[in-house]
Image (cartoon, rainbow, N blue to C red):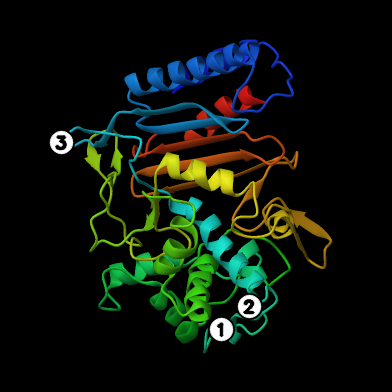
Amino acid sequence: MNIIRLYMVLFSALILPAACKSDKSPQTPPTTEKIYLSEIAGRADSLLHYLHKNRNFNGNVLINHNGLKILEKSYGYADFRNQAPLKSQSSFRLSSVSKQFTAMAIMMLKEAGKLSYNDTVDKHLRGFPYPHITIRHLLTHTSGLPNYGEYFAQVVLRSKYKFTYPTNRDILLWLINEQPKPYFKCGESWLYTNTGYVLLALIIEKVSRQSYPNYLQERIFNRLDMRNSEVFDYQHKLPYRVYGFRNNKKLYDDHLFNRIYGDGGIYASAADLYKWDQALRTNRLVKRTTLKEAFSPTKYYNNMFSKNYGFGWHIDKDGQTVYHSGSSGGFRSIILRNLHQNNCVILLSNNQDGRYENIARVIYGWLD
């Protein structure tokens, strides 16, 4: 790993020529800017090729500068067992990057007048035992609800229940029947928890009267022509599915929580995430004012404190960059977006090992 860090530092230290300002369309950059962008793409490709050659990266990358794809490439295998190569259509498990799609579905239902961010959860999920927790608390990780992961791992080990893979409904029943103590009163602090986004998926189903997978497929994926994206169903064969591994050889694809969605569960290609990124720069799904709130820091404890997290997005201190990463079952994923410039870096990997957020941020910094 020291060699990799040294390589990244050397790359970061290289002085890139200043971008040439132009009034021309970003789709037709002037010659000087083309050379500049070509140099960035070449350096990113060299970095990823080096990491792949040294068994520290396996996956797909897409780099967007000013709306223009300057690098879209695959490195390695979709399945190490048969050495099936990755393709541009390859669909990776997004893990927690899925949260931004759950948040979008909630925002769409809010704009349609089907719910309010201030609705209490028990208004939509009968029997929910925490009367003051709202949809906004779930979106912003200020609910105080404990994370279901550790508890259900212990449950399965003890074989307390008969299921092998818990579902969203099981998470809700756990909260109703056992009423675990929250970490804090809702709205008084901030703590990242997957439980809130599992409940949001159930609220989407209740309010829309559609399954969560169908709602996202019809309202988001189909609308944006995201042809290689879906909420994964193990009974349905995803044409360009990628399998997760560790150390480039050990299958690590299966996971105890593979049947749960909302906090994860989506598979998508880098090309589809580019379409998603571009759509978020328009009002195709929701109004710009709605998106602005999703990319704004969360206020808590009577507005005395704030956390740089909106609705399914982390926010850098500069307020210009939003991002989210994900990790589970042999996969690592990250999307970094500049809100004021049409720049984005998407890095998807099916090799659990490696510091992919660091790699993505080095490349993202070259675009600035």
Give how far across and how far down residue 243 sits, in percent: 27, 44
Residue extending farthest to the bottom is 127
**Mark 1 → mark 3, Cα distance in angstroms:** 46 Å
Residue type at the position of mark 3: Asn
Label 2 – label 1 distance at C-alpha:
9 Å
In this view, 356 is above or below 363: below
SS class of the residue under badge 3?
Answer: loop
Q: What's the amino acid at mark 2?
A: Leu
Residue denoted by label 3: 82
Mark 3 or mark 1, which is nearer the start of the sequence? Answer: 3
Q: Residues within 10 Å of mark 1 (few under 14, many from 20)?
A: some
Q: Which three-letter amino acid code belongs to the residue tagged 1?
A: His
Q: Is residue 227 visible?
A: yes
Tag 2 and tag 1, C-beta contact below 8 Å: yes
Image quadrant where one finds the C terminus: top right
On the image, numbered disc 1 is attached to which residue? 124
Specify few, some or many for label 3: CA neighbours under 10 Å numbering under 14, 14-19, or 20 or more.
few
> Which residue position is annotated with label 2?
115
Q: Residue at x 55, y 55 (%)?
A: 100
Foreground of the two, 324 or 205 = 205
First in sequence, mark 2 or 1: give its number.
2
Element class at badge 2 = loop
